[in-house]
């Protein structure tokens, strides 16, 4: 059962243009939503069990419900800072179907009572950003954005903000800091952004994919949406498969699809002559799975039980020809480079581990070094200000634990 | 009574022992005066200014400041020696080192040998191995107390 | 009030307090580097992690607020392990040159290592190389290698002074604190940066390498350099007799005083301590040889009392002139008022204070003397020295302090028969007066001062006064007794506290509510 | 006139002998002997133009040093007594030598000169009296210093000397009973006789207990280790604490002279004085028959040499004892004197009396 709901029209030419989109029945969800009361929309979203697609999997409806009813401007930030290595779903959504995102933004804003929304897009996505800006301009023209949307009396402005290329700005509070024009450092939580966020105002932060799912929920109803996925976990998921498979790319599949199926059925199996060695199931920050662990359902809870996580659902496939030490080296180098330097364990821990791994790759390592890496990574895990520390520690820990023999062989 | 006899016996023994020392030593002294060479000497004394005993490697003698590669003292003026010194005989004044890599150097380093008790704590405390007590200099008498206050130039060697 | 349990010890604490403060109140110290009472928590050092029952992760004590029934463990195995881990990270990139670091001795990192660390180093890589001597301000040197990026300095400039000269540059392991585009920290509060730095990263050029922290003795006093009356900590070395090194004040730190100066003092007060060290007068000088006075306090006091008595007997007390200043404490001003105004009815009372300068809107006030308000409340009319009025019909002049202009006095003093000066410093004035008596400074005696807001603050002696110096209050009480005009009144004044009680009985402003 | 001259010459000779012996026995020998006992070398640095000869110049150097040291009189002391005390000590020891016979008599031309400054008929009493008077020097020096430690030392000295004075006197009673004379020359002459035809009739053979008591008491009289309670360097520092320079030197010389006086007394009273066994005025008369005749001057020379050798031996013995034993405790000292020496000497007197009455 492979039904595309989000990526249904991705193949169509010029689908990103508003005319083509309207032809396929676009912006109907907005029209429907604007006739509903915000509370009804919130109920519907809550019922749909739409969980955040950014990585943490926090239910979107619950998040919106946290926004206090205060006399302060509220903001929506759409997190399009897709920095996780292996993840590229948001780029596809924005470049193929920007209006779906805009639709979602309008509905969300209407639901929470927001009049300005920001899309924080990754600096490297230049073409994507341009396309998004074009789409916004088109929407303005057609009256879906700006003052008095569809004569409902609801105002909304959407601004595209381009990041400067820091991984940390994908973290919600760092994203806010960056949006405010400051250095992209994460903030101390609590207070959570839902109460004190952008410019000290209540702020909703959602992933592109999450927001893009909203119109589908509104248009088709929560029950239909839940039916597309698991009871606790509504809707489909876009899996971005990369690595040594025949057909890398994005695959929209219901949650709970087996990882084995994703690799061997949908992505066309391993490349010729290559053998599966390991899979990173949810972006680089997810703990690695060994080849004998791939027969697993891909949903939030099952993966957590298996000691990994779904994250951004970016499946990275590693073959036997790739040395895990090189994988480790890439991982540590990435995190050491991207650590913002604010809190101690992440700033020094990642760079320290990177130094050790680099030395090991030069053949100057010892068995003690692997113990050291394990110890240091567990010292980072859970002790940092923002999840970047955990994101760095988890893959390192899993690689060092599961492939210890291989690492030792390379010493 | 027996105790009293023992007491007297001991008294006599004492005289016998000292007397034996006297006669034996006297015999060798006499041989020496007569010019007859023997291996054994009549005394264990060293005739100090002429003959000097070899100072052991671990002996704590006069301090010195070890020079570094550039000839300046290795000392970094951390004042740990002055801190640990039980007789408070070390006085250091630090100054900023013009070298950007270095922190400070001793502008003044004074040891008042007159106060020093040669405990060697300064040597143990030094993190840079910059002060040592291995000069084998033990003749430190002066006619004036102020001459016993040694400064950097005197200590650097 | 909520009840929480810290290490299973019940603590009653106000709602909204952080766990760190609650623990502090209960006498349990939780290590912290980036947290400072003056700023909101930042949570970047990760040293204050504590275990809270029911929470899966360790929480930050500096930002977590107390909840009813919360159970906090500050020394559990998990917590200690976490702290060890954080310390290990900090020390991995921190140069281990404590012996030459100026902060050694009052460095928090050193203390915490002593408490939690003491492990063997596993760090076999090279430490990052960074600039060791960055001059970030007129008095500040920043050692980027020692910096642990607690960002207290950045936050101080951002949140307290609001000049924002410092920022964090680069990211990750290469992060470093630095100044923006060659604009150094040159505000009047830059010295505080060196004080709040928990490690030896920001050091004070004024103190740098002069001595070691553990050689210094310290005591709390009040800054006399403006009328704000900030609480300060004076750190001094008692002197090295054998090497001819005298007692010397090495630095001044701000002391915490929420009502007056918070946690800060200005650079004027911080670096202007040389008056304590230099040019001190330490003996009594008698310039009139024909009087045959031995330079001993008792004899001089008897001589002065005799003079006063004689003038009173002849009814010539109006021929007494008095030059005071606002560096005198409330007690001394009170005694002076009593003796010369009430008892002797002297009319020529002048004030010689250091000239007013510009203040800033934070702590520094335009008046550069500590007790101007006190003098006014005491009933003195603050007039500057009028040399013409001074010179006419004056038999005895008693002057205090070294803020008198030498040139103005030269002509005026010629005709006066007896001239007495109380001063703490050697200056050109000393030859103009017949008797010069050494006095201690604020840091060297006890008493109280009234600051610009009318707040009366007591202080006690930190340093020993040099040589023959005798506190003015003691000398004045003695003089009051010796002069014999109102003996029983002066008899009970044997300490500043007793005098202060005496003031309270007479002037309502100084009355202490009981 | 010539008599006076002769006495004068005798005095000079005696004093020179005394001084030389004091310097070299009490100073050089003591230093050297203690060194040899200790496996050391002893003072050998004093030199004249680089010539050292076993440190024989050391006593001279010591003397020069003491002469040139500051003559310090402490304030608050009694200046006159403080100054006079060492002289009293010195004087009373020095005069004792007048009664000691150095030899028999020498015939020069017509004149017979006794080798003794003055041949007292109460010589023994004179010596004992003079030795007792020496206490004054000690007490006065201790008192005049106005120092508690000095006074303690002086009082201890007085107590000790008075205690041992008794034993000293009593131990000689037996001897006086045997040689019924107080004249030292007569006692020495008596010791020239033979006992059983071959044994010289020396005091040691007739009065062994008397000798022991006398010798111990005499050592105690010299205030030297192990009887140096008045000085007691480790506890009270002694009666001469406040003395320096030549005055202290006088005390030291008194000390040295006392050794010699005691040795001379022991020699004279118990070891035949100048007597050489079997040597009579014209030569040796061996007990197994036969004789070896010698000229008069050789005999005199032998006798004087014998006396000196005996004195030197006893000096040596005293120095050996001094460098062998530790000091007595004060109560032990008193016990030794009062509870051992005095009863022993009394027993000796009674025993001597009984034996004499039987024979």
Image (cartoon, coloured by chain):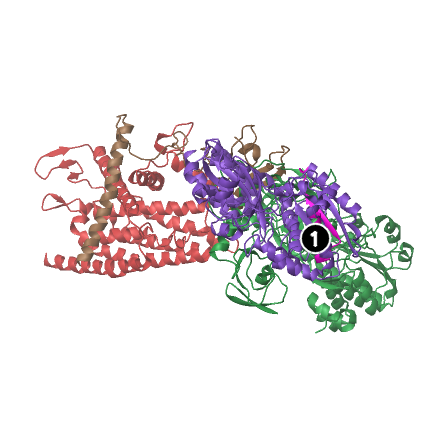
Chain colours: A purple, B brown, C green, D red
> Label 1 belongs to which residue?
A29
**Residue D11 lies in what quarter of the image?**
top left
Tell which subunit mark 1 falls on: A
| Viewer-closest of A114 and B8 | A114
x%, y% of residue D128?
A: 30, 53
C21 horizontally vs C181: left or right: left
Residue appearing at x 70%, y 48% in the figure: A25
C148 horizontally vs D187: left or right: right
Q: Is residue B35 above or below residue C20?
A: above
Over which residues does the magenta segment extend?
A101-125
x%, y% of residue D171?
A: 23, 55
Check disc 1 and report its element: helix, strand or loop: helix
| Viewer-closest of C83 and D211 | C83
Crowd band around label 1 with a 10 angstrom C-alpha radius: few (<14), some (14–19), many (20+): many
C477 in the magenta segment: no
**Quadrant (top left/top right/bottom left/bottom right) for the C terminus of chain C:** bottom right
Whether residue A188 is visible here, answered yes or no, is yes
Residue appearing at x 25%, y 28% in the figure: B38
| Viewer-closest of C318 and A222 | A222
x%, y% of residue A212?
A: 66, 49
């Amino acid at each position: 059962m492979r039904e595309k709901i989000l990526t249904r029209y991705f193949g169509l030419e010029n689908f990103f243009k508003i005319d083509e989109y309207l032809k396929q029945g676009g912006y109907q969800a907005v029209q429907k939503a604007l006739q509903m009361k915000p509370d009804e929309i919130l109920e519907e979203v809550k019922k749909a069990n739409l969980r955040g697609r950014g990585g943490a999997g926090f239910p979107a409806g619950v998040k919106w419900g946290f926004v206090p009813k205060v006399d302060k401007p509220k903001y929506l930030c759409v997190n399009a800072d897709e920095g996780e290595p292996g993840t590229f779903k948001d780029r596809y959504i924005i470049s193929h179907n920007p209006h779906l995102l805009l639709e979602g933004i309008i509905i969300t804003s209407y639901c929470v009572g927001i009049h300005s929304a920001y899309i924080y897009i990754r600096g490297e996505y230049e073409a994507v950003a341009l396309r998004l800006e074009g789409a916004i301009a088109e929407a303005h023209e057609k009256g879906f954005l700006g003052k008095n949307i569809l004569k409902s009396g609801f105002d909304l402005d959407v601004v595209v903000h381009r990041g400067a290329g820091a991984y940390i700005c994908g973290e919600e509070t760092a994203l806010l800091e960056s949006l405010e024009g400051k250095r992209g450092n994460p903030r101390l939580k609590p207070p959570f952004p839902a109460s004190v966020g952008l410019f000290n105002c209540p702020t909703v932060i959602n992933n592109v994919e999450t927001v893009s799912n909203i119109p589908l929920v509104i248009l088709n109803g929560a029950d239909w949406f839940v039916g597309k996925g698991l009871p606790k976990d509504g809707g489909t998921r876009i899996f971005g498969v990369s690595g040594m498979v025949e057909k890398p790319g994005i695959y929209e599949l219901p949650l709970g699809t087996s990882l084995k199926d994703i690799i061997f059925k949908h992505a066309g199996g391993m490349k010729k002559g290559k053998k599966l060695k390991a899979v990173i199931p949810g972006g680089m920050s997810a703990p690695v799975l060994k080849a004998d662990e791939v027969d697993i359902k891909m949903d939030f809870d099952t993966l957590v039980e298996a000691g990994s996580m779904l994250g951004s659902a970016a499946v990275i496939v590693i073959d036997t020809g790739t040395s895990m030490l090189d994988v480790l080296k890439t991982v540590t180098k990435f995190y050491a480079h991207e650590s913002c330097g604010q809190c101690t364990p992440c700033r020094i821990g990642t760079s320290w581990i990177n130094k050790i791994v680099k030395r090991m790759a030069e053949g100057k390592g010892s068995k003690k070094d692997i113990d050291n890496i394990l110890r240091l990574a567990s010292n980072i895990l859970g002790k940092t200000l923002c999840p970047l520390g955990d994101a760095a520690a988890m893959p390192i820990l899993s690689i060092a634990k599961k492939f210890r023999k291989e690492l030792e062989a390379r010493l | 009574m027996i105790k009293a006899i023992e007491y007297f016996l001991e008294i006599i023994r004492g005289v016998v022992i000292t007397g034996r020392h006297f006669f034996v030593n006297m015999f060798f002294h006499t041989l020496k005066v007569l010019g007859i060479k023997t291996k054994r000497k009549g005394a264990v004394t060293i005739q100090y200014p002429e003959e000097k005993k070899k100072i052991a490697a671990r002996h704590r003698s006069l301090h010195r400041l070890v020079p570094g590669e550039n000839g300046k003292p290795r000392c970094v003026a951390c004042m740990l020696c002055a801190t640990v010194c039980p007789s408070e005989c070390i006085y250091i004044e630090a100054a900023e080192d013009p070298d950007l890599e270095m922190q400070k150097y001793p502008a003044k380093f004074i040891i008042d040998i007159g106060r020093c008790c040669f405990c060697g704590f300064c040597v143990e405390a030094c993190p840079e191995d910059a002060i040592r007590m291995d000069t084998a200099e033990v003749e430190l008498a002066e006619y004036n107390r102020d001459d016993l206050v040694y400064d950097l130039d005197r200590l650097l060697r | 009030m909520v009840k929480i349990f810290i290490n299973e010890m019940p603590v009653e604490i106000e709602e909204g307090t952080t766990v760190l403060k609650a623990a502090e109140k209960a006498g349990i110290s939780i290590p912290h580097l980036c947290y400072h009472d003056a700023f909101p928590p930042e949570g970047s050092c990760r040293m204050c992690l504590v275990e809270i029952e029911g929470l899966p992760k360790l929480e930050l004590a500096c930002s977590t607020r107390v909840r009813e029934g919360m159970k906090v463990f500050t020394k559990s195995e998990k917590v200690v392990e976490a702290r060890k881990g954080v310390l290990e990270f900090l020390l991995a990139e921190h140069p281990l040159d404590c012996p030459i670091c100026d902060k050694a001795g009052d460095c928090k990192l050193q203390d915490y290592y002593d408490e939690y660390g003491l492990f063997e180093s596993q760090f076999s890589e090279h430490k990052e190389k960074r600039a060791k001597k960055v001059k970030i301000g007129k008095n500040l040197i920043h050692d980027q290698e020692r910096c642990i990026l607690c960002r207290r300095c950045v936050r101080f400039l951002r949140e307290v002074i609001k000049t924002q000269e410092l920022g964090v540059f680069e990211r990750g392991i290469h992060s470093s604190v630095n100044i923006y585009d060659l604009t150094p920290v040159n505000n009047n509060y830059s010295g505080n940066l060196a004080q709040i730095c928990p490690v030896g990263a920001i050091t004070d050029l004024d103190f740098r390498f002069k001595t070691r922290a553990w050689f210094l003795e310290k005591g709390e006093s009040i800054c006399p350099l403006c009328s704000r009356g900030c609480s300060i900590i004076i750190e001094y070395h008692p002197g090295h007799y054998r090497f001819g090194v005298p007692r010397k004040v090495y630095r001044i730190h701000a002391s915490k005083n929420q009502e007056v100066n918070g946690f800060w003092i200005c650079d004027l007060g911080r670096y202007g301590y040389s008056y304590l060290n230099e040019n001190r007068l330490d003996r009594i000088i008698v310039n009139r040889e024909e009087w045959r006075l031995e330079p001993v306090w008792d004899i001089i006091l008897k001589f002065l009392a005799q003079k006063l008595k004689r003038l009173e007997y002849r009814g010539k007390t109006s021929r007494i002139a008095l030059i005071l200043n606002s560096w005198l404490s409330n007690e001394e001003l009170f005694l002076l008022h009593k003796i010369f105004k009430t008892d002797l009815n002297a009319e020529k009372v002048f004030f010689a204070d250091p000239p007013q300068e510009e203040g800033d809107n934070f702590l520094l006030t335009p008046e550069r003397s500590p007790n101007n308000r006190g003098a006014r409340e005491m009933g003195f009319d603050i007039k500057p020295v009028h040399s013409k009025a001074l010179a006419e019909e004056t038999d005895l002049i008693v002057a205090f302090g070294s803020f008198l202009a030498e040139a103005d006095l030269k002509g005026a003093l010629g005709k006066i028969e007896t001239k007495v000066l109380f001063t703490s410093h050697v200056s050109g004035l000393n030859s103009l007066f017949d008797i010069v008596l050494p006095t201690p400074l604020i840091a060297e005696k006890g008493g109280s001062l009234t600051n610009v807001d009318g707040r009366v603050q007591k202080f006690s002696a930190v340093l020993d006064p040099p040589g023959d110096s005798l506190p003015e209050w003691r000398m004045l009480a003695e003089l009051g007794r010796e002069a014999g005009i109102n003996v029983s009144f002066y008899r009970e004044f044997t300490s500043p506290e007793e005098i202060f009680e005496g003031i309270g009985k007479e002037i309502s402003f100084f009355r202490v509510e009981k | 006139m010539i008599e006076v001259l002769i006495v004068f010459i005798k005095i000079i000779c005696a004093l020179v002998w005394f001084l030389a012996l004091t310097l070299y026995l009490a100073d050089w020998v003591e230093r050297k002997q203690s060194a040899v006992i200790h496996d050391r070398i002893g003072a050998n640095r004093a030199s004249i133009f680089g010539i050292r000869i076993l440190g024989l110049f050391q006593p001279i150097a010591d003397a020069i040093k003491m002469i040139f040291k500051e003559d310090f009189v402490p304030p608050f002391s009694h200046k006159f007594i403080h100054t006079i005390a060492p002289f009293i000590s010195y004087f009373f020891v020095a005069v004792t030598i007048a009664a000691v016979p150095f030899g028999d008599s020498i015939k020069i031309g017509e004149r017979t000169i006794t080798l003794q400054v003055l041949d007292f008929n109460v010589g023994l009493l004179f010596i004992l009296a003079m030795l007792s008077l020496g206490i004054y020097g000690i007490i006065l020096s201790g008192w005049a210093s106005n120092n508690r430690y000095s006074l303690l030392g002086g009082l201890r000295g007085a107590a000790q000397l008075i205690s041992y004075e008794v034993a000293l006197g009593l131990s000689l009673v037996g001897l006086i009973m045997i040689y019924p004379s107080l004249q030292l020359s007569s006692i020495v002459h008596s010791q020239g006789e033979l006992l059983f035809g071959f044994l010289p009739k020396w005091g040691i053979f007739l009065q062994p207990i008397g000798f022991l008591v006398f010798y111990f008491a005499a050592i105690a009289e010299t205030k030297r280790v192990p009887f140096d309670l008045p000085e007691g360097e480790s506890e009270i520092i002694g009666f001469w604490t406040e003395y320096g320079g030549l005055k202290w030197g006088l005390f030291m010389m008194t000390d040295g002279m006392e050794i010699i006086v005691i040795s001379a007394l022991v020699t004279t009273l118990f070891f035949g004085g100048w007597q050489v066994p079997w040597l009579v005025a014209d030569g040796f008369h061996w007990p197994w028959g036969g004789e070896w005749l010698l000229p008069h001057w050789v005999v005199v020379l032998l006798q004087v040499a014998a006396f000196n050798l005996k004195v030197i031996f006893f000096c040596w013995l005293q120095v050996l004892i001094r460098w062998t034993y530790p000091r007595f405790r004060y109560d032990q000292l008193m016990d030794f004197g009062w509870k051992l020496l005095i009863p022993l000497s009394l027993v000796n007197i009674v025993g001597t009396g009984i034996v004499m009455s039987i024979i």
